[in-house]
Amino acid sequence: MSRDESQQQASTADAITMIPESKGSKLVILSASSGSGHTRAGEALEAAASLVPGISSARHIDVLEYGSALLGGLYADLYEQMVSKTPSLWGWWYDKSDTPWKGEHFRVALECSQMRPLMECLKIEEPDIIICTHFLASDIVSYMLQREKLSTRHAVVVTDLHVHAMWLCHQFERYFVPAEESSYYLSQVGFPEDRITVTGIPIHPAFSRNMDREALRRRYEIDPSLPVVLLTAGTFGMESSLVAVRALMNMQQPAQIVALCGKNADLLAEVVEATKAAPAHLKFRALPYTADMHEWMAISTLLIGKPGGLTLSEAIASALPMILLNPIPGQEEINAASMLEQGVAVSPMDVVTLPYKVDRLLQEPHRLAGMRDRMKQLAHPRAAQTILETLLGQQFSQDSMSIPKITG
């Protein structure tokens, strides 16, 4: 089967959740596997759909599975290469392109020419509601609505603290944004305030559950007398992850350090090898990909990671203070600055000083307690449910069906 033929069929990455004995709205969630955050937000909304009455079915689609190789290369491969190998170039492009409506016509025309299988899929699906967690998806849906090629309710979910100009689209019912400042920004560039809702970034409903931390510590064989430092090593790339792990071996405070290595088997083996020489007061553990991040965050004392929107939202929901390392120029630097401003994270000047930062925080329990208290004030653990409930609660409002057109 050719690539074009395969694109016409349902993607193997698609997921359909049927809600039994329920009559209601047909929901399609569109994300893009350009970075993991957009996909995780889509997965969170899909999981929440089974908990919210009024949804008959929920289908989660990775739009890049319905695009050409050219578009996949631009939005996934090129992005990954830039942030990992030339982050300064990515930061330059992020800033340069952050002007509302700049280059919009060319961009959307290119996207639509390369996403015809997705457009046909949406026509066949005829969803009552489409929620987009990536700007590529919202561009396509907005284009189809403007040209009356689709009739649906369109919601956009922003997955970073700053609403970059790429997120702006003309035809929509509602924007769901992470913070009040994001809402203020949209209103200042001309979006109707009554079409903007602050919900936080959608995270998996598991983060809103009450968890028995003592039982979890026993299950994972965690020493209750020692703090747990959780390192999301897989987010840094192999070389920088190993540098971070080796730096942590210089910590002075006793601790348990859990390095989550994702699906990188080579990194897992390297971390195990590198930590064999760890001093006796430090207990290292390297783990592969886990679907139980909510449980590990619940029993940890500190998180070391990159400031992606989803990771930050999960940590805040878990009241887990953060040490932010190596933010990507652009969206992650903005995310990190916001967390530092809120007083829920610290950032070392260099990976060499990482153990110093960890030791200082572990020596200041009152400071850690203050950071946790502030996180509880900022948390939106039910963001995914709130987004769905907001849309469903308004579905019989005639005014909400009048989708505004924003001119640039």
Image (cartoon, grey):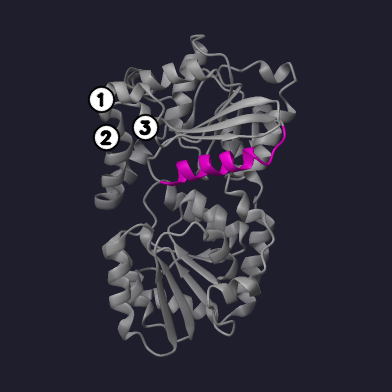
Image point 37% across, 88% down: which residue? 279
Q: Is label 2 in contact with label 1 (beta carbons under 8 Å)? A: no
Amino acid at pointer 1: Met
Q: Quadrant of residue 51?
A: top right
Q: Is residue 162 left or right of residue 271?
A: right
Amino acid at pointer 3: Leu
Give the secondary structure at mark 2: helix
Q: Is residue 42 magenta?
A: yes
Q: Is residue 317 magenta?
A: no
Between disc 3 and disc 1, the foreground one is 1
Quadrant showing the N terminus = top left
Give the secondary structure at mark 1: loop
Where are the magenta residues, as a range? 36-53
**Residue 64: assigned label:** 3
Is residue 227 placed above or below 370 in the rendered structure?
below
Q: Which residue is mark 2?
A: 73
Q: Could you give the CA–CA distance between mark 2 and mark 3, rounded to whole angstroms?
A: 9 Å
